Image (cartoon, rainbow, N blue to C red):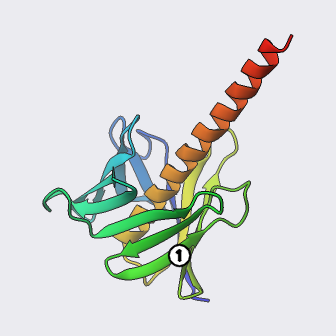
């Protein structure tokens, strides 16, 4: 197993000295990047080391490109390969990773390159958890930020599913009386 570096965590919007609606990406409490995530779409812009990235859902995959790249191009990609197992295929500028869930109950993904773990996702907090990522230092920061954003997308999808399950159960219970 590779030596994993310090934890990246997504901070609360507007905290750590970033603007309103901007999520800071923190490493050891210091802002190393920023993300402005769309509220209703799976899209975001990120600034990593003075380079602007565009992350968005494109057809059946999540893609990342430089803002200066033409639309339709992708330097970073993630595609869900199994909904039931929660597995993803991730392409980080030619480096192929497999992402799997450690359990049904956790939204954090484990990322492996040829069977060797290179990153692991998690969350902080319990009431309003935010994604975290611990990655091998060999992964460039922009790739780590993309994986962190993928963690946010997966968590939002999970919340939508559980919200629908709970709402469906409440509606069914109300209708059966």
* Residue in the foreground of this view, choosing between 143 and 124: 143
Residues packed near mark 1 inside 10 Å, few (<14), some (14 to 19) or many (20 plus)? many
Which residue sits at x=86%, y=10%?
Answer: 177
Which image quarter holds the N terminus? bottom right
- Classify residue 109 as left or right of residue 168: left
- Classify residue 106 as left or right of residue 154: right
Q: Position of residue 53 (x, y in %)?
A: 26, 58
In this rendering, is residue 30 above or below 157? below
Residue extending farthest front:
176
Q: Where is residue 98 in the image (x, y as percent from the top left)?
A: 53, 75
Number of marks in the rendered image? 1
Q: Quadrant of residue 116?
A: bottom right
Which residue sits at x=62%, y=46%?
Answer: 129
In this rendering, is residue 170 above or below 59? above
* Residue in the foreground of this view, choosing between 24 and 139: 139
| Residue 17 shows in the view | no
Q: In which quarter of the image is residue 48?
A: bottom left
Residue extending farthest top:
177
In this rendering, is residue 97 above or below 25? below
In this rendering, is residue 143 above or below 114? above
Q: Quadrant of residue 52?
A: bottom left
Which residue sits at x=55%, y=45%?
Answer: 157
- Classify residue 80 as left or right of residue 108: left
Which residue sits at x=42%, y=65%?
Answer: 78
Q: What element carries label 1?
A: strand
Which residue, given by chain and number where applicable, does mark 1 sit on? Answer: 98
| Residue 91 shows in the view | yes
Q: Where is residue 43 in the image (x, y as percent from the top left)?
A: 34, 47
């Amino acid at each position: 197993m590779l030596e994993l570096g310090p934890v990246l965590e997504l901070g609360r919007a507007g905290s750590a000295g970033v603007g309103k609606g901007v999520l800071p990406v923190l490493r050891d409490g210091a802002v190393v990047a920023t993300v402005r995530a769309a509220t209703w779409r799976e899209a975001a812009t990120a600034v990593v080391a003075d380079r602007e990235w565009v992350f968005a859902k494109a057809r059946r995959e999540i893609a990342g490109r430089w803002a200066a790249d033409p639309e339709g191009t992708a330097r970073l990609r993630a595609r869900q390969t199994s909904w039931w197992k929660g597995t993803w295929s991730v392409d980080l500028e030619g480096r192929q990773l497999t992402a799997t869930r450690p359990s049904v109950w956790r939204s954090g993904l484990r990322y492996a390159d040829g069977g060797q773990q290179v990153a692991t996702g998690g969350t902080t907090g319990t009431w309003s958890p935010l994604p975290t990522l611990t990655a091998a230092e060999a992964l460039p920061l922009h790739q780590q930020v993309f994986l962190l954003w993928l963690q946010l997308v997966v968590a939002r999808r999970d919340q939508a599913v559980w919200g629908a399950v709970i709402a469906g159960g409440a509606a069914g219970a109300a209708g059966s009386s």
